[in-house]
Image (cartoon, rainbow, N blue to C red):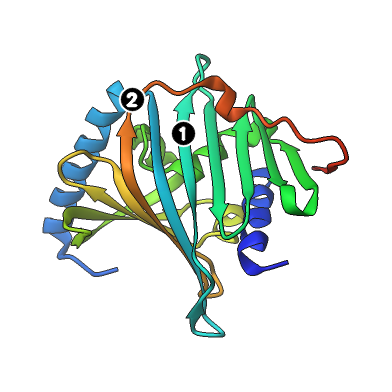
Amino acid sequence: MNRMTTLGLLAVAFLAAGQRAAPAQAGQAELDQVLRQLESRGKTFSTFSAKFSQKKYTSVLKEFDTPESGLFVYARARDGSALLRQEVQKPGVRILTIKGGVATLHQPGLKQAQRVSLGKNKDKAEYLALGLGQSPAKLRETFDLKYAGVETINGVACSILNLKPKSTAAAAYFSSITLWITKTTGIPIRQKLQEPNGDYLLVDFTGEKVNAKVSDSLFDQKLPPGTDVQELR
């Protein structure tokens, strides 16, 4: 099992469980501005889809794993719950879906799947889509927020927002999450998920589409006969 597959399993386990410095005053003013932008975007948000690429950095080896790429789709169901599909297409197929409070990770090549009912932790599904439609008030409930400057990503000016989990259980998985949020659209186009041991996952989005029509079938996983399904608790 490679480290990227292990990270996918870590994401499922996490769902089942519980930068550059800026001057204080300027940082607070800029933070407030970014949060107002997120608030405005959240009022009209319904769906987000994009191509993504991600690579895992292992601190002990001081190197990145083989990059992965695929499709990412996030939406809200009518009851307000998260709908998510993260489909890794290269170099191998791995599909994570969340619908109805149930997360399913399918590895077709291994004929294996892991499934977990999120129950009271269903809100944690939004950890995989931070900055996409959540209100600043909701983010503040879960994270300590800090403005960390400005950086240009692929020619696009972005505000950098650092999120540190308040929950000890959550921080055991991700010690911090950094978002690069475009100044023009208020959408994150890069995420960095930092683990306590120094490893991190870097995710980039391209070809983003906001509020485009998305089929509900994208969030269903019909597992082929013969798939070994492990029910996690």
Amino acid marked by disc 2: Asn
Q: Which residue is mark 2?
A: 211
Pointer 1 local density, CA inside 10 Å: few below 14, some 14–19, many at least 20: many
Which residue is found at the position 56% from the left and 44% from the top?
87
Amino acid marked by disc 1: Tyr
What secondary structure is found at the residue carrying circle 2? loop
Find residue 144 and report its horizontal and vertical position in percent.
38, 52
User: Quadrant of the image for the N terminus?
Assistant: bottom right
The mark nearer the N terminus, 2 or 1, is 1
Which residue is found at the position 56% from the left and 50% from the top?
88
The mark tally for this picture is: 2
Q: Observer-nearest residue: 166 or 176?
A: 176
User: Quadrant of the image for the C terminus?
Assistant: top right
Which residue is found at the position 52% from the left and 72% from the top?
199
Q: Which residue is mark 1?
A: 74
Find residue 161 and report its horizontal and vertical position in percent.
29, 54
Dividing the picture into quadrants, the one containing residue 21 is bottom left
Find residue 64 and report its horizontal and vertical position in percent.
49, 75
Dividing the picture into quadrants, the one containing residue 176 is bottom left
Q: Observer-nearest residue: 162 or 107?
A: 107
Which residue is found at the position 54% from the left and 58% from the top?
171
